[in-house]
Amino acid sequence: MSLLVVGSVAFDSIRTPQGDSGRILGGAATYFSLSASFFTQVRVVAVVGDDFTQKEEQVLLNRGVDTSGIVRQPGKSFFWAGEYGENVNEAKTLDTQLGVFASFNPQVPEKFKDSEYLFLANIDPVLQVAVRKQMNGARFVGGDTMNYWINGHRSALGEMLQNVDALLINDSEARLLAQDPSLARAAQKVLDMGPKALVIKHGEYGATVFFRDGAFGIGRHPFRAPTLPIEQVTDPTGAGDSFAGGFMGYIASQSQLTREVFKRAMFYGGVMGSFAVEAFGTERLQKLTKPEIEERYRIFRELTHLE
Amino acid sequence: MSLLVVGSVAFDSIRTPQGDSGRILGGAATYFSLSASFFTQVRVVAVVGDDFTQKEEQVLLNRGVDTSGIVRQPGKSFFWAGEYGENVNEAKTLDTQLGVFASFNPQVPEKFKDSEYLFLANIDPVLQVAVRKQMNGARFVGGDTMNYWINGHRSALGEMLQNVDALLINDSEARLLAQDPSLARAAQKVLDMGPKALVIKHGEYGATVFFRDGAFGIGRHPFRAPTLPIEQVTDPTGAGDSFAGGFMGYIASQSQLTREVFKRAMFYGGVMGSFAVEAFGTERLQKLTKPEIEERYRIFRELTHLE
């Protein structure tokens, strides 16, 4: 079934101990779309500038992503330059240029409004809520946010949290949002703010999904999925968005939202995140095949399962 | 089968956000013994002072631990005072008094020399090697160490690493020992130093075992076990030693060392560590029952397993 993502399509320039990417295609919605495209039909709503050419669009089209919701405006696309040191969990921002993204006011095209699954990538929570309200028919809505919105836009974020079924954030964001250093307690506090499910991404340690009591009729026990211990992380950019793409994409591909579907979605999220970091930018996702995904899913299972 | 542990039996005084323990029984060998005692027959070799009374010994005897290898010497037992803040992964040492432990020179009693399983808790690697040499019949040897020995006693530690089958350390110790910030790469480097298996404990994220190629005839794929997301960590002291006790105790209880036994041992390690942190000192381990252990093992499985 159709999955709509609203977020950034952008350019990045990334330096890691493994090298320098130069100016490459990036953006949360880009990583998300490519990742989810292995599971379901994906539609994107975003804004780009004159520098977004046929070449960049072709990357999404090659994966069957519907790009007709990407609006072109005069000016430059969002641009981010960052650097990672030996600690791949921390990016240092070198430059941010909002460009046309500064006035992003996402309008969902009529023909996209029948999308049953919606992902609100990390943008202003006011815009996330506005998009959510254009999509009243959505069966399941996922969302992301970041420290910037948690610190300075708590009231808007509070409304956003009332409007998503699942929130996907990382450890430090969960602790900051709940203002509690205990991850398990923080999870309960965030669930009390609105979402029925909270997926906390632990970077190289995997991810845990926590459920509100009675949510989806599947019980409140958490579930934890691993990632692969990877010897060489080339570029961690987009790992979280690729996780979200695998997670939401798998859910959208299933007719029912059972506990087992949630569990498999967590595994596919981890699988897609683990591929994303193997090369700069979206390079690895562009070359990926479904058999490679299934093979890694099998390895994740082997990594964690008793007989 | 019999499992011998050599290490510290001590007193601790612990402050955490949940309170102050006062002077209580502690020490790596104490936590290890209590934890392992749920799986197999445990024997301890340690040194204590006059302050170690029948009351403390009874804690071990109640769990069927053979305490006849605990040598009493005039003076005080090893004492450690520490404090944990909101980050339960970091202890601040307030006081250390070595006491009789300063001249610890472990001699394995003749009647203990038939122990088939041996655990070298965190002591001077020179002593660990000396104990190992007294136990030539041991089928499987586990060992622990810490930053102090990694930083300042690398050559002695190198010999210790050639003398253990499995090394159990945490993330920061693995990175420090291998001098590599990537955990997966660090694991391979540590395995190159001697041990056939390396168990890296990730605190609240669980633990991963890495194998040397061909070790134990069980393949080199790593295996990851979870811990429970716990809302209230009362006292993290002894979590790692309790993990080691569950891990080694389970292995010692099985007739063969298969991949499946290793995997279950990782789960039991996590289970025992998760219980240890629920109360101050060894309090929770003292009250624990086998059905509680099996129930939590089932929960760990539910937390991580697809259908």
Image (spheres, coloured by chain):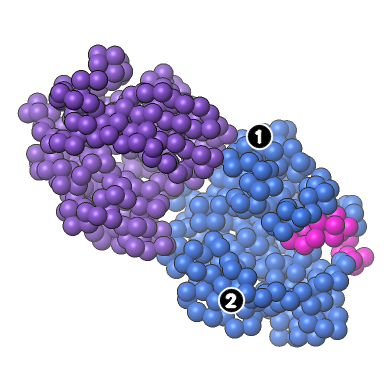
Chain colours: A purple, B blue
Query: Label 1 is found on which chain of the structure?
Result: B
Magenta range? B107-131
Q: Looking at the rendering, which quadrant does residue A268 occupy?
A: top left
x%, y% of residue B277?
Answer: 54, 67
Q: Quadrant of the N terminus of chain B?
A: bottom right
Tell me if A136 is positioned left or right of A258 in this view: left
Q: Nearer the viewer, residue A1 or B98?
A: B98
Nearest to N terminus: mark 2 or mark 1: 2
Residue displayed at 55% across by 49% down:
B225
Q: Is residue A51 above or below residue A94?
A: above
Residue displayed at 85% across by 70% down:
B104
Q: Does B117 appear in magenta?
A: yes
Tell me if B104 is positioned left or right of A279 in this view: right
- Report crowding for label 2: few under 14, some 14 to 19, many 20 or more residues within 10 A (C-alpha): many
Element assignment for label 1: loop
Q: Is residue A294 above or below residue B281?
A: above
Query: Label 2 is found on which chain of the structure?
Result: B
The amino acid on which the numbered mark 1 sits, given as a three-letter code, is Arg
Residue ID for mark 2? B14
Q: Nearer the viewer, residue B200 or B58?
A: B200
Q: Nearer the viewer, residue A38 or A189?
A: A189
x%, y% of residue B35?
Answer: 65, 65
Q: Quadrant of the C terminus of chain B?
A: top left
Q: Does A214 appear in magenta?
A: no
Give the number of the disc on residue B220. Answer: 1
Q: Nearer the viewer, residue B9 or A250?
A: B9
x%, y% of residue A306?
Answer: 55, 44
Residue displayed at 23% across by 41% down:
A123
Q: Is residue A194 visible?
A: no
Q: Is residue B253 above or below residue A99?
A: below
- Report crowding for label 1: few under 14, some 14 to 19, many 20 or more residues within 10 A (C-alpha): some
Q: Is residue A45 visible?
A: yes
